[in-house]
Amino acid sequence: MNNLGRKARIVVGQNLNIPGAIGGTATPVSLKYKVKRGDTACQIAQRYAVSCEQVLVDNQLGRKGKISVGQILLIGGRSSKTSANVTVSKYTVRSGDTACGIAERFDVPCSTLIRTNRLGKKASLRVGQELKIANVVGPAAVSDELDSQQHGWLAKVDALPDMTLITGADHVILKVLPDETLAHYADWMGSRNSGLIRKMNKLAESSEPRLGQSISLPIGSGKTRELFKSRRSEFHQVLTEEFKERFVIKEVKAVKIKSGQSLWTIAQKYETPMWLLIRFNPGLGSALQPGQVIDVALLERK
């Protein structure tokens, strides 16, 4: 392929052809992995830069992905019931790109792209940065095995909340969503100082805004506003993708609210995130009324 001869001498700067190299379609390569104590299917997939979905499909592990110590798994290859294989390509980050936007373009889970490239929780990118994109090619996918009920539940999980910004001359107003903090708002604006936001909204030192509270932010320029919207949306997409990597919904239960219960106490009781409660109950506020009935997703770790 490279006509190197028996001594295989190469020189600095020489271009070599590599079969299945990053930058194009990779040749499917399979290897066997013996499960060790503490392993999970998705952790093993991450270790070998393949999608969790492919490991589940190739080894017929089902939706829960249960594995046992000593079990032999096929990684990055083909099972008798699927023709799925892994392709790896390289992408150079451009101005305006976001991690989840790139993941959507290549049809891969956002959380997989973030972990493969070690981008961290903020999924920060820089123009010119090279990312590895690992994807599964083939007709089989775990989502195809889900029944219609599971599809309906996942549609609610994927439905991002309303992130409308009310625009003023030199500020914007938003409603606080679950898991958002003043530090997030400052970061998404491109600032590290949340003090101005706190002062602008007359918030006490070290306090955080309430869920559903209207907050003003000192955003005047259109460029900063678009950056904020992009980063905020990506934050909630990452929450969603990380959740789907770690949990499955085993049941959705109708819960009748009792006196004294709040969204927070319900989330604690059923060990479910507040943002998920709201996605299953659109329009739900932090104040609940006795006798009110809400849907609660009961979760199980993969």
Image (spheres, rainbow, N blue to C red):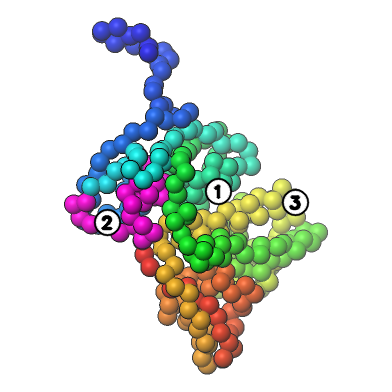
Number of residues whose C-alpha sits closer than 10 Å to that of mark 2, classed few (under 14), some (14–19) or many (20 or more): some
Contact (Cβ within 8 Å) of mark 2 with mark 3: no
Task: Tell me if residue 197 is in the magenta stretch.
Answer: no
Which residue is identified by label 1? Answer: 100
Q: Residue furthest front?
A: 81
What's under tag 3, amino acid-wise?
Answer: Ser
Chain part drawn in magenta: 49-71
- Main secondary structure type of the part rendered in magenta: loop
Residue 74 point in image, percent of width and height: 29, 43
Identify which amino acid the numbered label 1 is placed on: Cys
Which quadrant of the structure image shows residue 50? top left
Which mark sits nearer the N-terminus, 1 or 2? Answer: 2
Whether 126 is drawn above or below 22: the answer is below
Do residues under tags 1 and 2 come within 8 Å of each other at their CB atoms?
no
Badge 1 or badge 3: first in the primary sequence? 1
Amino acid type for the residue under numbered disc 2 = Ile
Instruction: Assess disc 3: are there few (<14), some (14-19) or many (≥20) residues with their C-alpha within 10 Å of its C-alpha.
Output: few
Asked if the magenta segment contains residue 64, the reply would be yes
Find disc 2 in the rendering and name its residue. Answer: 67
SS label for mark 3: loop
